[in-house]
Amino acid sequence: MAGTVGLAFERPISELERKISELKSLASDGSINLAEEIKTLEARLEKLKREVFESLTPWQRVQIARHPKRPYAMDYINMITMDFVEMHGDRMFSDDKALLGGFAKIDGDKVLVLGHQKGRDTKENLMRSFGSAHPEGYRKAMRLMELAEKFDVPIVALIDTPGAYPGVGAEERGQANSIAYNLREMMLLKVPIIVVVIGEGGSGGALGIGVGDRVYVMENAYYSVISPEGCAAILWKDRLKAPEASEVLKLTAKDLLQLGIIDEEIPEPLGGAHRDPEKAAQNVKKVIKKALKELKAIPEEELLKSRYEKFRKMGSV
């Protein structure tokens, strides 16, 4: 996916990658030796990548978090788990395609995996509500989490949503209640819970599966009480102020780590997870496995106490 870029600040990189690709194509038949030119351009490309990607603004990280080629929950599930069996329905209304869940294994460790799922095209995005879950999605998630608790299986939640679905139907079916219920019940689950924000972590839509013993945010993901555009619309009455809002919200992994909201930042390949999904997945897997090992060794009573204290102290500084 190396050349698949489209964000404004990535264009110089994209143009240089295209030039290198053209030179390699010209030299492919062996009639022209362009090795030195290609080597020079590749060195310049590497330098340019580092200059651009190592000094990203919060707004630019938000844009990468929304990149259409970024790996989604199902991509990570396919790359880091085995024997995944998806389960459906909340047993009350329907099956929400925006929030999926099922049991799987990570190198032999049984886990329940939950995740917001976006679509790759318009049709799938409409089916999955662009990753914005309905009440039935959160009720399905809680049903599966209670099942995991019954069989003493740890929970892994992959967050990637701009927020819970805001439609009238969702509100009529108890959107706020379903999220609030999950917040309370997740605090009481007697199994380890690991949360990873893999893309967008928007508001209550993220928190509905976001209560965990360990909370991680990927390098180019964000976790926030509101989207930058929503914040800009409220504070400045202008959604174009989203870059300024991104600064104020302190929504990047580095900011959240400094504020004590999360436990760790998960590094991404240079340029974002979409440039090397396999490497990004291995980074996520490494962190999850480490957390599983640590949390399994903690007695149940101590696990619940530390989880409660973790969230109670947020915002107290």
Image (cartoon, helix red, strand yellow):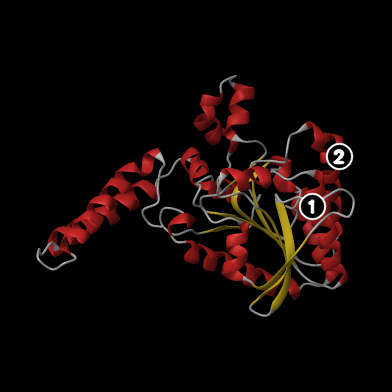
The amino acid beneath tag 2 is Gly
Are dots 1 and 2 in contact, CB under 8 Å? no
Q: Quick one: label 1 or label 2, which is nearer the N terminus?
A: 1
Residue at the bottom extreme, as displayed = 108
List the single residue furthest toward the right. 92
Q: Residue furthest front?
A: 123
Q: In this view, does 261 lie above or below 9?
A: below
Q: How crowded is mark 1: few (under 14 residues within 10 Å), some or many (20 or more)?
A: some
Please tell me whether residue 251 is drawn above or below residue 146 in the rendered image.
above
Measured in 3D between alpha carbons, the distance from the residue under mark 1 to the one under mark 2, in whole angstroms, is: 15 Å
Q: Which of marks 1 and 2 is in front?
A: 1
Give SS at disc 1.
loop
**Is disc 2 placed on a helix, strand or loop?**
loop
Picture coordinates of residue 101, whole percent (x, y): 74, 60
| Residue drawn at point x = 73 percent, y = 70 percent | 111
Residue 116 seen: yes
Q: Residue at 40%, 51% (x, y): give it.
A: 4
What residue does disc 2 label? 174
Q: What residue type is labelled 1?
A: Asp
Task: Identify the residue under disc 1.
Answer: 95
Question: Does 182 sit above or below residue 192?
Answer: above
The reply to whether residue 314 is in sight is: no
